[in-house]
Image (cartoon, rainbow, N blue to C red):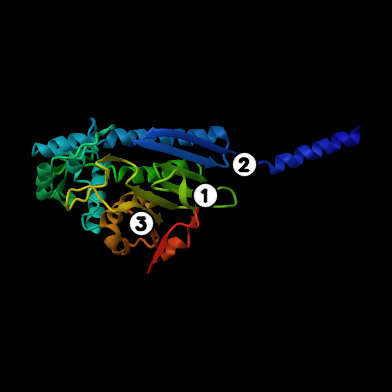
Amino acid sequence: MKQSVLFLMSCLLLASCSKEPPTYQEQGYVFGTLVDVTVYGEEESHAKQGVTAVMHEFQRLHDLLHAWKPSELSELNTAIAQGKSKSMSPEVAAMLKDAAQLSAESDGLFNPAIGGLIQTWGFQADDFMAVQPDEKKIAALVKANPQMSDLIFQSSSSADNGNIVVSSRNRAVKLDLGGYAKGYALDRAAAILNQHGIHNALINIGGNVLALGAHGKRAWHVGIQHPRKPGAIATLELRDGEAIGTSGDYQRYFELDGKRYCHLIDPRTGQSVQGVQAVTILTHGEHAGLLSDASSKPLFISGTAGWLAAANKMGLDEALLIDADGVVHITVAMQKRLEFTDSKTKVKIEP
C-alpha cells in the first residue's frame, strides 16, 4: 500500500511538472473589427487584469478617434469644414503630426485627410450600400487635393492644459485615422501589458498582429488570411517586438455589376484600388504596430507596378502583394519567413 501511494504521488508530481503554462485569451469588437489578446504563462487573474486594461484602452481610442460619430476627431472635422480652428488634446495633436510625417514619407499615398472621399464611397458607415458614388463629387474632392500637410498646429493660449490648436489651409480636409488607429492601439496595448508585468502576449486587431515575447520555448505562430478563401494562405513565426499588417480588398467592400470596390481609395484618382487582393508587411522595432497599419496602405495603392518601389522607399524589406489573379509577389526576405499552406500557390519572388 505504501509503495502504491508513493508511486501515485510520484505520478502526480511528474504531471504537475509537465503541465503546460496557462494561456489566457479574450476577444472583443472595436474599431469596426474583431480584436483578440492572448497572454501566455501568467495566472488567469493577473492576465485578465492586464487584458481588461488593454480592452478599455481600445474602447477609449475608438471613442476618441471616430471619424463620423461624435468624437474629438469628428469635432475637428466640423471645425475645418467651417474654416475654424479647434483646440485638441496633446495626444490627438501628436497623432496628427505623426500621421502627417508618415504621409510625407509615402509621397501622400497614406493620406488620412481624404475622409471626404471615403465618405463619398459610402465606407464611413457601419453598414454600407452597393452604390456607385457621384463621379462629379469625387472629381471635385480630388481637385481640392486635401493633404495632411494642410494642417496647422499652434500652441494653445491656455498653457495649463497643454492643448494644441489645429486648423487647416484647406477646408476639404476631412480626417479619417482608420488606417492609423489600429496600429497605434497595438503599440499602446504592448505598453500597457508591459506595465502590468506581462511580457509574453499576442495582440490581434483585425489582422494587424503584434507579438510580445514568445509562446513558451517557441515564437508565436500566426497566419496570413487568404483573400479569397477561409483560412490562411501562409504562416510564419512572429518574434518578440515584430508585427504584421495586412490591407485587403476583402475587409470592407461591396460588389456592383460583378466588380469589387474596396475601402482603400487612391487619393490621386479618388477611385477604389483595383488589381490587388491584399498586401502584407512585417515590421519590427519601435512603433512596429503603428507601422504595420499605416505602411501597408501605400503598397496596396501603388499596385503591382509600384509596390516594390514603395516598399524600398519606406524601408520595408519583408513584404508581399497578392495580385488580382492570386499570384503572390514577395520579397526575398519575406519569402524566407513564410510557409505557404498550399504548395500550388503561385509565387513570384521579387529581386
Alpha-carbon span between mark 2 and mark 1: 15 Å
- Residue at 19 percent across and 40 percent down: it is 132
Kind of residue sitting beneath label 2: Pro
Q: How many marks?
A: 3
**Disc number lying in front (2 or 1):** 1
Q: Which mark is residue 220?
A: 1
**What SS does tag 2 mark?**
loop
Marks 2 and 3: in contact by CB < 8 Å? no
Q: How would you rate the neighbour count of disc 2 (Cα within 10 Å): few for under 14, some for 14-19, many for 20 or more?
A: few
The residue under label 3 is 321
For this rendering, which residue is in front, 250 or 25? 250
Q: Is residue 158 among what the camera can see?
A: no
Q: Is residue 270 left or right of residue 20?
A: left
**What SS does tag 1 mark?**
strand
N-terminal of the two: label 2 or label 1?
A: 2
Judged from this view, the residue extending furthest toward the front is: 257
Q: Position of residue 130 (x, y in %)?
A: 24, 36
- Residue at 73 percent across and 40 percent down: it is 15
The residue under label 2 is 21
Q: Position of residue 103 (x, y in %)?
A: 23, 53
Q: Is residue 83 left or right of residue 243?
A: left
Which quadrant of the view contains residue 166?
Answer: top left
For this rendering, which residue is in front, 308 or 262? 262
**What SS does tag 3 mark?**
strand
Marks 1 and 2: in contact by CB < 8 Å? no
Looking at the figure, which quarter contains the C terminus?
bottom left
Kind of residue sitting beneath label 3: Leu
Alpha-carbon span between mark 3 and mark 2: 37 Å
N-terminal of the two: label 3 or label 2?
A: 2
Q: How would you rate the neighbour count of disc 3 (Cα within 10 Å): few for under 14, some for 14-19, many for 20 or more?
A: many
Alpha-carbon span between mark 1 and mark 3: 23 Å
